[in-house]
Amino acid sequence: MRGQFAPQILARVSDAAAETVEYETRSVQTVRGTEKLMTAKWEKDGWELVTQNTGKVRTELVFRRPKPAFPWKPLAIIGGVLVVLGIFIGIMVAVTGDDKEGSPAPADTPRSEAVAPQDESSTEPQESTAPAPAEESPLTVENNADLAALLTGPQDGPTVEAFAAQYAGQLIEFDGAIGAMNRHEGSTTRYDILIASGDYSETHSNGGPSFQFRDVSITNDLHLTDDSPDTIGVGDNLHVIARVGSTDGQLFLLTPVQTSVR
């Protein structure tokens, strides 16, 4: 009889587990027209799009994903091991306690008073003899035709991929604007910042790929100039000097070197 009811019991346990799945949600705002890019990024990290509320300028996207299960089993095993270890130590202390009483205290071992002499010359700072690196000049639309074509060309495709491959690791300098800015994986201090070329506009695109500063701190990683404000946000026009990174077909990653608000 027990073998006949086992499949039914397992099925009920499975259904109960499915009903108890808890989700965490995130709400993200992005500029209209970039919903697909934002959705693809979050789905890549395991999130599921739940709702999409489109406004005149911005769109609110709501994502969810299952919360990770709490590791009860490993904790229970560790707790059991600690309990057994505590009992064993208690027994050993009780057994050996009487033996330690009455035993003579060990004689003090004389310590050597000799001290190794210090090399006074080693405390003096050594001047570096390595040559300073040559100053690197960034590529601009004035001195590089490929960059000029990139910033006015299509959002993705062969032109973007060819530029990323040819100029990987080099500095580029251009005027851009913040099109979207979201917290990186729920962090309170690090952001994913979408950069478009040219001045900020809610109605049209100036061309070029969607650049991104990924997982950056505003105070430490953007290297804001002294005349820049303490905070930045969507709609701010920037002057960017950054190092060329990779492209995944949707976003062109850059590493900020110097950023100023125009």
Image (cartoon, helix red, strand yellow):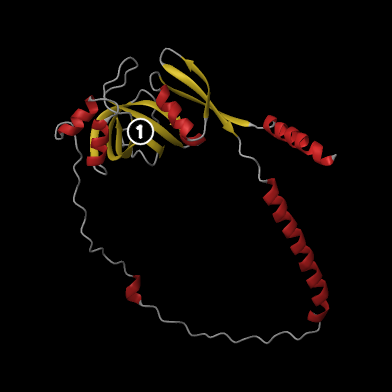
Percent across and percent down for residue 96 are 80, 77
Callout 1, which amino acid? Gln
Residue drawn at the location 35% of the way across and 71% of the way down: 123
Whether residue 188 is visible here, answered yes or no, is no
**Quadrant of the rendering where the N terminus is positioned:** top right
Q: Is residue 18 above or below residue 97?
A: above
Query: In the image, 79: left or right of 114?
Result: right
* Residue ID for mark 1: 212
Residue drawn at the location 34% of the way across and 25% of the way down: 236
Percent across and percent down for residue 111 are 57, 85
Closer to the camera in the image, 225 or 34: 34
Q: Is residue 99 above or below residue 221?
A: below
Instruction: State the image quarter where residue 84 is shown.
Output: bottom right
Q: Residues within 10 Å of mark 1 (few under 14, many from 20)?
A: many
Whether residue 161 is visible here, answered yes or no, is yes
Residue drawn at the location 49% of the way across and 22% of the way down: 61
Percent across and percent down for residue 92 are 79, 72
